Image (cartoon, rainbow, N blue to C red):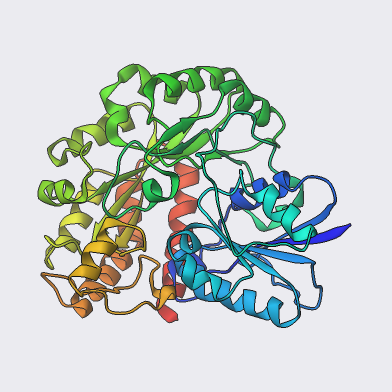
C-alpha cells in the first residue's frame, strides 16, 4: 500500500493567524483523503498544530497552499523533493500562480480538486504524473464523500466539526479571489446529505465553512428548517442580505445559529461601491446589526483598512463604530492584493505593489502603496486599531451584558488578544 501525506503549511509567526490557539482543521485535506480511495495509507499533517517528520517519507506528498503560506509550502516541497519524494501543489495560490508553483512541484492542481484528484493519483501510480491538472467543469456538490475526520489530530483543535453546504458566492468583490477560484457560480449541496453527515459527527459546535450561507435564501431556509430538530449550535459566514428576510433570520435563530461572520468592509459607501459589494448599505449598518442582535445572533464583523478612499481617520472611526454597535468580535484587515483579484490587477497596472514576499500577504502587513497614506502610516494605524480593539476596555464595551453567546465570544476575544500580543513581539 502506497503512502500519501496531505499537508497544510504553518502560518508565519509574525502573522496574527500564526498565533491563534483556537484552531479548526482544513476541510480540504479531509476531503482529499476521502477521494483517494483504496490502496493508499493516508496521513494528514497540519503544521500549525504538529511538526512534519521529514524522516518518515511518503510515496507522494500533496500540499495545499494559500498565498501567505506559499513560501513555507515551497520550503516543505523542496525538502521532500530533495529526498526523492514527488510533490503535488494545489489550493488558492498555485491556482493563481501555477507557473511559479510548478518550479517547486512535480505537479500543480488548479481550481477545485475533486474532479481531477483521482486522476492525479492514478497517473502517479502509473508513473505518468502530468505537470498541470485543471478540472474542465465545475464540480457538483451532490454525493460528496464523507470527509476523513478520523485522520485528524483531534486534541489539537478547538473543534473539528467543519462542513460545507454551498460553494462560491453570488457577489464578486474586487478584493476577493473566491469568484476567480470557484467560477461565477453558487452551488448548493443536497440538504439530506448535509443532515446525514451531521448525524455522523461528534457532538459539539458546527462551523459551516461556506463563503455565504444565505446566498440562496430559499435553499438556506430549507437547510435551517432541517437543522432545527438537531438542536445544534453553529457559526458561519453571511452577507448582510440576511436582514432583508425576517423569516430567514428567524429560521437561522431557531436552527441554532449563534454567530455570523459578516463583511462590513468599510464605513464609506464610496468605498463599498468601488469594491463591488453592492449588497452593503452603510446607512443601514446600525439597524442591520440591531436586528441580527435582536434574534440572539452574535456578529464577527470584518473591516478593511487602506482602500483608495481611506485616510488616517479611518482607524478611530471604525473602532468607535464597532464599540457603539457592540459587535461581539471583529477582524481588521489591511487591503491585500491577492493574485487573481481585480485589486491585484489594478495595483499591478498602476505599479503600486511593493513586493511579492508572500508571507506578508496575510492581511496584517502593507504590501502596496496606499493613495492617502504612506505604507508606514497604514501599518501603524492598523496596529493601533487592533491593540485598542482587543484591549480589555473595548472587549467589555462590546460584549457587556453578554447576552449573545457570551462565553463563546469571550473566549474568542481573549484568544485574539493573546494572539495579537504575541504577533507584535515577532
Residue 418 makes an appearance in the image: no
Q: Is residue 248 above or below residue 19?
A: above
| Left or right relative to 409: residue 40 | right
Of 92 and 279, which appears nearest the observer? Answer: 92
Residue 144 screen position, x and y as percent: 64, 34
Looking at the image, which residue is at 29% across and 55% down? 175
Tell me which residue sits at (53%, 63%) in the image: 65
Is residue 116 left or right of 84 when viewed as pictured? left
- Image quarter where the N terminus lies is bottom right
Tell which of 107 and 405 is nearer to you: 107
In percent of width and height, residue 188 lies at 49, 29
Report the residue at 69% width, 72% height from top. 51
Q: Is residue 190 visible?
A: yes
Give the quarter of the figure containing the C terminus: bottom left
Residue 365, relative to residue 119: is it above or below?
Answer: below
Looking at the image, residue 131 lies above or below residue 360? above
Q: In the displayed structure, would residue 115 be above or below residue 80?
A: above
Q: Residue at x 85, y 60 (%)?
A: 2
Report the number of discs: 0
Nearest the viewer among 138 and 58 is 138
Q: Residue furthest right?
A: 1
Which quadrant would residue 363 be assigned to in this image? bottom left
Residue 364 position within the rendered picture, expressed as x and y whole percent measured from the top left? 35, 68
x then y, percent, for residue 178: 40, 48
Q: Please give left or right for residue 139 compared with residue 321 in the image.
A: right
Between residues 322 and 311, which one lies in front from this camera angle?
311
Amino acid at each position: 500500500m502506497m503512502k500519501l501525506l496531505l499537508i497544510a503549511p504553518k502560518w508565519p509567526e509574525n502573522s496574527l493567524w500564526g498565533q491563534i490557539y483556537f484552531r479548526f482543521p482544513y476541510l480540504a485535506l479531509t476531503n482529499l483523503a476521502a477521494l483517494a480511495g483504496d490502496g493508499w495509507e493516508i496521513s494528514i499533517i497540519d503544521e500549525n498544530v504538529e511538526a512534519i517528520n521529514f524522516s518518515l517519507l511518503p510515496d507522494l506528498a500533496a500540499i495545499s497552499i494559500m498565498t501567505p503560506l506559499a513560501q513555507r509550502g515551497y520550503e516543505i516541497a523542496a525538502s521532500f523533493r530533495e529526498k526523492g519524494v514527488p510533490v503535488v501543489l494545489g489550493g488558492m495560490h498555485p491556482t493563481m500562480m501555477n507557473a511559479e508553483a510548478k518550479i517547486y512541484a512535480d505537479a500543480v492542481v488548479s481550481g477545485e480538486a475533486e474532479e481531477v484528484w483521482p486522476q492525479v493519483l492514478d497517473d502517479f501510480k502509473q508513473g505518468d504524473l502530468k505537470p498541470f491538472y485543471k478540472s474542465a467543469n465545475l464540480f457538483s456538490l451532490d454525493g460528496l464523500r464523507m470527509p476523513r475526520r478520523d485522520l485528524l489530530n483531534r486534541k489539537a483543535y478547538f473543534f473539528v466539526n467543519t462542513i460545507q453546504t454551498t460553494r462560491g458566492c453570488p457577489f464578486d468583490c474586487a478584493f476577493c479571489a473566491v469568484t476567480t477560484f470557484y467560477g461565477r457560480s453558487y452551488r448548493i449541496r443536497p440538504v439530506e446529505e448535509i443532515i446525514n453527515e451531521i448525524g455522523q459527527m461528534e457532538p459539539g459546535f458546527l462551523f459551516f465553512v461556506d463563503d455565504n450561507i444565505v446566498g440562496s435564501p430559499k435553499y438556506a431556509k430549507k437547510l435551517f428548517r432541517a437543522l432545527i430538530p438537531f438542536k445544534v449550535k453553529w457559526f458561519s459566514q453571511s452577507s448582510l442580505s440576511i436582514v432583508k428576510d425576517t423569516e430567514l433570520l428567524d429560521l437561522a435563530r431557531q436552527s441554532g445559529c449563534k454567530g455570523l461572520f459578516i463583511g462590513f468592509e468599510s464605513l464609506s459607501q464610496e468605498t463599498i461601491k468601488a469594491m463591488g459589494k453592492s449588497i452593503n448599505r452603510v446607512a443601514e449598518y446600525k439597524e442591520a446589526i440591531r436586528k441580527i442582535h435582536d434574534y440572539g445572533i452574535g456578529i464577527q464583523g470584518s473591516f478593511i483598512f487602506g482602500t483608495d478612499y481611506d485616510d488616517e481617520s479611518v482607524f478611530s472611526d471604525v473602532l468607535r463604530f464597532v464599540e457603539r454597535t457592540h459587535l461581539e468580535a471583529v477582524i481588521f484587515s489591511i487591503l491585500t492584493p491577492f493574485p487573481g483579484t481585480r485589486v491585484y490587477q489594478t495595483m499591478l497596472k498602476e505599479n503600486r505593489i511593493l513586493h511579492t514576499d508572500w508571507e506578508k500577504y496575510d492581511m496584517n502587513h502593507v504590501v502596496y502603496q496606499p493613495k492617502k497614506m504612506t505604507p508606514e502610516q497604514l501599518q501603524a494605524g492598523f496596529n493601533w486599531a487592533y491593540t485598542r480593539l482587543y484591549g480589555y476596555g473595548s472587549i467589555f464595551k462590546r460584549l457587556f451584558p453578554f447576552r449573545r453567546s457570551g462565553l463563546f465570544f469571550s473566549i474568542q476575544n481573549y484568544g485574539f488578544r493573546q494572539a495579537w500580543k504575541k504577533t507584535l513581539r515577532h
